[in-house]
Each structure stands twice: as structure tokens, then as C-alpha cells.
């Protein structure tokens, strides 16, 4: 009886809000956070009004051939639901879902989408499409249509012709709702031939083809296509590891163990292939599960592999996505050996030139080539997932981190190019970063709005990237600061972070109005966050969650006045008007089954 009473008392204490009640002037970073969350909504409306019809479809061409394009439609609004999940305007959630539906409708008309999923394409482009889709689980997981789609889409890969359950392989690098694409046609590539003429050829022994401009030559292009169909199209490739996010997304809706089993078996299959291939990931696995089976025995030469078209970054992204998702669902750090093995291998063959460390970006018959400085985002992501000191040391060895102090903000297709300066901030070496990155985000928003306002291009002349280059919502600084993690890998990664916020007053996902949050210290077992109420008159209350999917566990919290045991994945914090306070939170990572389920008190 005494044990029951003590347990009940501890539960009651843990459920009581942590109160922050010391009023202070709001830090500049908090004011910038609130400015961005406020201004992104009207900016998004200007973007949507300019580039969509009243029904929500993109203002564009009547026809669009080939297999490319739907990814770019979805990318145009890819971070709209994430903006809502962070605490952006409540109107964004229904708008984002409506726009997703309308992109699906438009590209179904074009013939690119079938049964609401890409008919067939590769997982670099699928990944770009479906990060938009994954964020709906964070924004609101209770909308039934998106939940059904999540399960239907996962089924395309856990069952059916896209999946070989015997050899644990996806059966082609081109796949989708119409199954694997073993034979590509000229029609499939019609919109990409001019683009690919700027990349190396897929192979150096294509009959009558010696230069990349052959992509645009109607007489020589068939030889390229024939060679690709013969060697590439029946092989699994590392790029397909990005499909693990689609399966993990279904798991977060349902908790069904079959999804976890699929992911772990697929990632383990690639880990075995790395071991079999002396530490480097092969970029082609044939129909019988053999390395180089369709490539004359060569471990390189696959679709989006070590030679063509991009080389290194596709292998680093795919292995990081696959390893991180397997860790998320199992809690087993061994899966990080997959991305670690590739980063280590590349570092071991790196060379120094003019005082700079260069890594190879491609491999073909001549060996490693195309030497460039290493990008920080991949080793930063590995360190963040592992919190292994060796991975941190590896990062500093591979990347010239001091050169990134006070580095200007960089915007790529996604919001994932500024992990180096963020990492330095966490190490106490870049103190101006919180304000600098938010100013950079806002400046980029203004730049894109200026492009929208001066855009006179007729719809029929717009290329397929036109809209995504003008999307004014830029979230990298908000994600890193508020959630304490890197933004997702753009080509299909999930959001792996320490903290997430809910608003119990408005019964929704996201940080409450007037509240700012800055994570400035992270360790394997702790996180430190400063919370700010910028309102001078209103009390605000927020629920913190341990991880984007509740995958972590809060153990205790110290508010500077007292320490309290928690032992749960949620805690409530109450901020009185103008209050500023710092919480030191101890936690156990990957202690819970990840889920999109909202905490009690919100739904």
C-alpha cells in the first residue's frame, strides 16, 4: 500500500508543470524566432497566390512528359507542414494538405503519379517528394486520409514487385506505384537530357559515345539508354535506402512491427554487402543478390552510384538515412556503422592539397577521382545520432570547422547546409550564431519574396524548379534552435531531434504563441534549453516531448531552483508573463517506441 501511495505521489509531482517565473528582457534570438513564425504565413500566402490557381493547382503547362516533375511539385511546398508543426499559423495545416492533394491531382493528369504515388522514379527524387508527406505526421497525425496513404505507400515496398524478400533488395533503382522500371524509354528522360549533358557519362565504354553532350544527340542517345537498361535497371542501389523513411513513417502511425522488421532487414543486408566488399558500399546488387552481377563484376557503376551522376553525396545521404531510421525504430546504435563505414573509408583515402584535405567524390576504372573538400552535414549528422567522441573527432579531422565560425548563411534546395556553424555553437565557439542564422533565414525569405514580386515569366516557360526556388519559408535556424537537432536530410530524411513542443491551450502541435526556445547544450544524456515568454501580459504553457516522435525519455529536470524526477517522454512548462528560464534536462535516448501520437492534454 505504501509503495502504491509513493508511486502515485511521484506521478502527481511529475505531472505538475515546471514553472518559469523570472521576468527578464527577451533575448534577441527569441524575438527573431517569433518574427519568423509570424512573417512566414503572409509570405507563404503571397507565394501561393502567385503560383497557384484558386483551386490550389499550380499555374503551369497543360502537358508535362517523362517520369520527372512530381517531386518538384511537392518540393514547392515541402516545408509548409513542418512550419505548422513548429508553431506556425494554424491555417497552414489545412492549406498544406490541400496543396499536396492538388500537386497529386495535377501530376496524375500528366501521367507521372499513379494511385497518388509516383508511378516510377528513383529514391533521390522520391525522397524530395515525400519529406513533405512525412511532415504531416508531425503536423497532425489524426487526419485519416494521410494515415491511409502512409500505409498504402509503405505497402508498395514491403509487398509486391518492388521488393525481393529472398535477397532483401529493392528490385530496380527506378520504382514506384507501377512497380520496378526495368526498361527506360526515351520518353522517360525527355525532360532531363539537357541537364544530364553536364554530368559525366554513366559509363566510359558506351558504343559511339565519348562525351556527355551525346545525351542531346538523337543518334547517340539510344546507345546511352541501351547501356543503362542493360547494366543498371535490374540492380538494387544504395539510393533505395531512402525508402526506409517511407516505411518508418507508416510505423509511426501504427506501431506495426512488420515495418520495423522490413527496415532492419534491409539495412542489415546493406551492412553485409559493405563487409563483403572490403568496407566500401557497392552501388549495384543484381537480381540474385550478387555485387556487380549486371556490371561485369564491378562494384561501382550503378545508378546514382559512385560514378554517375553525383557520386559521393548520394552514398553518404542514403546510408545516413537508412542507419538513422533503423536506430530510431530499434534503439540499436550498431546501425550507425553503415554510414560510419563510408565516411571512414572516404577519409582514409583522402589527400592533402595546398593545406586542404580533399575527399574523392567518384570512383570508376581509373580509381578515385573528383577531389573536393568534405561537406560538414554528413559527419555532423553521424555525430548527432551517435554522440560518440570518436565521431566528433572524425568530424573535426575531416572538415575545417574553425573556418565555419561566423560563416555566412547558405541556402541550398533544402534547409540543411549550415550544420557546421550550429555544431560550433553547441561547442561554445560561435556565440553569435543564434541571431546570425535567423537573420540569414529572414534575409533569404525577403530575397525570395522579391523574386516572386518581379517574376514576369509566362507559365509555359517556367521550368520544373521554378516554384521551389521561390518558396519563402526557411526553417533551418528554427529547427536547430528550438528542437536541438539538425534539419532533415533533404533527399528523404526524417527529423531526428531532441525536443518537440505542443500547445495545450490551442490543442495543437507546435510551440505556443509568444514563446521562444533555444537549445544550447546537448550531450548523450542531457539537453539544456532556455525558454522565453515574450508576452508581458499573458501566461503561456507548453508541453515538451523527448524527441520528434517521443523516442527519448526525460529522466529529470533542473530549473536552477530545484531538481525533479520525470521518467516520462512529456513534461509541461508554464511561463509567466515576460519569464525567461533555463532547464537542464537529463534523458535517455531511444528508450521509447517512436510514434506520432500526441500527449495527453493536447488531443
Image (spheres, grey):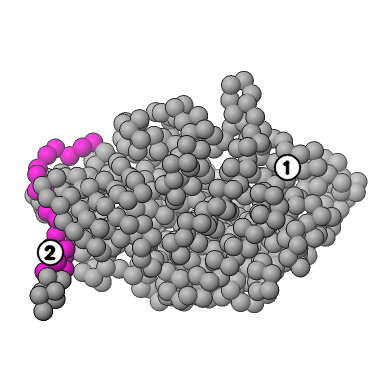
Task: Residue at 42% x, 69% y: name it.
Answer: 252
Q: Which mark is residue 363?
A: 1
Foreground: 164 or 147? Answer: 164
The residue closer to the viewer here, 241 or 119, is 241
CA distance for labels 2 and 1: 59 Å
Give the residue drawn at x 80%, y 38%.
366
Is residue 327 magenta-colored? no
Compared to residue 134, the image places residue 83 above or below, namely above
Determine if residue 455 is in view. no
Q: Position of residue 409 (x, y in %)?
A: 43, 34
Which of the two residues, 341 or 363, is positioned nearer the viewer here? 341
Query: For residue 195, what is the image quadrant?
Result: top right
**Outermost residue toward the front?**
2
Tell me if residue 525 can be seen.
yes
Quarter holding the N terminus is bottom left
Residue at left offset 48%, top offset 33%: 396
The residue tagged with tag 1: helix, strand or loop?
strand
Residue range (magenta): 8-28
Residue visible at 84% across and 57% down in the picture: 226
Residue 309, labelled with which disc? none
Amino acid at each position: 500500500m505504501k509503495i502504491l501511495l509513493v508511486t502515485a505521489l511521484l506521478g502527481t509531482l511529475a505531472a505538475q508543470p515546471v514553472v518559469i517565473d523570472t521576468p527578464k528582457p527577451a533575448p534577441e534570438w527569441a524575438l527573431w524566432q517569433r518574427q519568423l513564425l509570424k512573417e512566414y504565413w503572409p509570405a507563404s500566402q503571397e507565394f501561393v497566390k502567385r503560383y497557384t490557381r484558386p483551386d490550389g493547382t499550380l499555374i503551369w503547362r497543360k502537358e508535362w512528359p517523362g517520369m520527372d516533375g512530381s517531386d518538384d511539385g511537392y518540393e514547392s511546398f515541402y516545408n509548409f507542414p513542418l512550419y505548422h508543426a513548429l508553431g506556425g499559423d494554424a491555417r497552414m495545416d489545412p492549406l498544406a494538405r490541400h496543396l499536396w492533394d492538388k500537386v497529386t491531382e495535377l501530376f496524375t493528369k500528366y501521367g507521372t503519379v499513379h494511385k497518388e504515388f509516383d508511378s516510377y522514379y528513383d529514391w533521390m527524387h522520391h525522397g524530395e517528394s515525400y519529406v513533405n508527406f512525412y511532415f504531416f505526421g508531425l503536423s497532425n497525425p489524426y487526419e485519416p486520409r494521410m494515415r491511409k496513404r502512409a500505409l498504402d505507400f509503405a505497402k508498395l515496398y514491403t509487398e509486391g514487385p518492388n521488393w525481393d524478400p529472398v535477397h532483401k533488395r529493392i528490385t530496380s533503382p527506378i520504382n514506384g506505384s507501377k512497380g520496378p522500371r526495368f526498361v527506360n524509354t526515351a520518353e522517360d528522360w525527355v525532360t532531363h537530357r539537357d541537364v544530364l549533358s553536364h554530368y559525366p557519362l554513366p559509363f566510359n565504354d558506351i558504343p559511339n559515345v565519348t562525351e556527355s553532350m551525346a545525351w542531346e544527340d538523337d543518334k547517340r542517345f539510344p546507345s546511352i539508354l541501351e547501356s543503362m537498361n542493360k547494366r543498371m535497371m535490374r540492380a538494387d542501389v544504395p539510393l533505395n535506402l531512402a525508402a526506409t523513411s517511407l516505411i518508418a513513417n507508416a510505423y509511426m502511425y501504427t506501431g506495426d512491427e512488420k515495418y520495423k522488421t522490413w527496415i532492419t532487414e534491409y539495412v542489415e543486408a546493406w551492412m553485409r554487402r559493405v563487409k563483403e566488399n572490403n568496407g566500401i558500399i557497392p552501388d549495384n546488387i543484381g537480381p540474385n543478390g550478387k555485387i556487380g552481377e549486371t556490371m561485369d563484376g564491378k562494384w561501382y557503376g550503378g545508378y546514382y552510384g559512385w560514378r554517375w551522376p553525383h557520386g559521393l553525396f548520394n552514398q553518404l545521404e542514403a546510408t545516413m538515412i537508412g542507419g538513422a531510421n533503423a536506430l530510431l525504430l530499434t534503439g540499436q546504435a550498431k546501425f550507425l556503422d553503415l554510414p560510419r563505414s563510408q565516411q571512414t573509408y572516404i577519409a582514409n583515402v583522402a589527400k592533402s592539397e595546398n593545406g586542404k584535405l580533399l575527399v574523392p567524390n567518384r570512383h570508376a576504372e581509373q580509381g578515385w577521382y573528383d577531389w573536393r573538400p568534405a561537406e560538414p552535414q554528413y559527419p555532423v549528422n553521424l555525430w548527432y545520432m551517435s554522440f560518440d567522441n570518436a565521431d566528433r573527432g572524425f568530424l573535426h579531422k575531416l572538415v575545417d570547422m574553425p573556418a565555419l565560425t561566423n560563416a555566412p548563411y547558405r541556402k541550398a534546395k533544402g534547409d540543411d547546409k549550415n550544420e557546421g556553424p550550429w555544431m560550433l555553437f553547441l561547442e561554445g565557439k560561435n556565440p553569435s550564431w543564434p541571431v546570425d542564422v535567423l537573420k540569414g533565414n529572414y534575409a533569404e525569405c525577403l530575397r525570395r519574396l522579391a523574386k516572386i514580386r518581379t517574376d514576369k515569366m509566362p507559365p509555359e516557360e517556367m521550368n520544373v524548379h521554378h516554384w521551389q526556388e521561390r518558396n519563402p519559408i526557411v526553417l533551418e535556424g528554427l529547427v536547430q534552435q528550438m528542437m536541438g537537432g539538425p534539419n532533415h536530410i533533404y533527399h528523404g530524411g526524417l527529423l531526428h531531434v531532441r525536443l518537440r513542443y505542443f500547445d495545450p491551450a490551442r490543442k495543437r502541435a507546435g510551440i505556443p504563441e509568444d514563446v521562444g526556445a533555444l537549445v544550447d547544450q546537448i550531450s548523450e544524456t542531457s539537453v539544456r534549453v532556455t525558454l522565453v515568454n515574450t508576452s508581458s501580459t499573458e501566461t503561456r504553457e507548453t508541453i515538451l516531448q523527448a524527441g520528434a516522435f517521443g523516442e527519448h525519455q526525460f529522466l529529470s529536470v533542473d530549473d536552477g531552483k530545484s531538481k525533479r524526477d520525470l521518467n516520462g517522454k512529456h513534461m509541461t512548462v508554464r511561463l509567466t508573463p515576460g519569464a525567461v528560464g533555463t532547464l537542464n534536462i537529463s534523458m535517455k535516448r531511444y528508450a521509447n517506441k517512436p510514434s506520432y501520437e500526441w500527449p495527453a492534454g493536447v488531443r
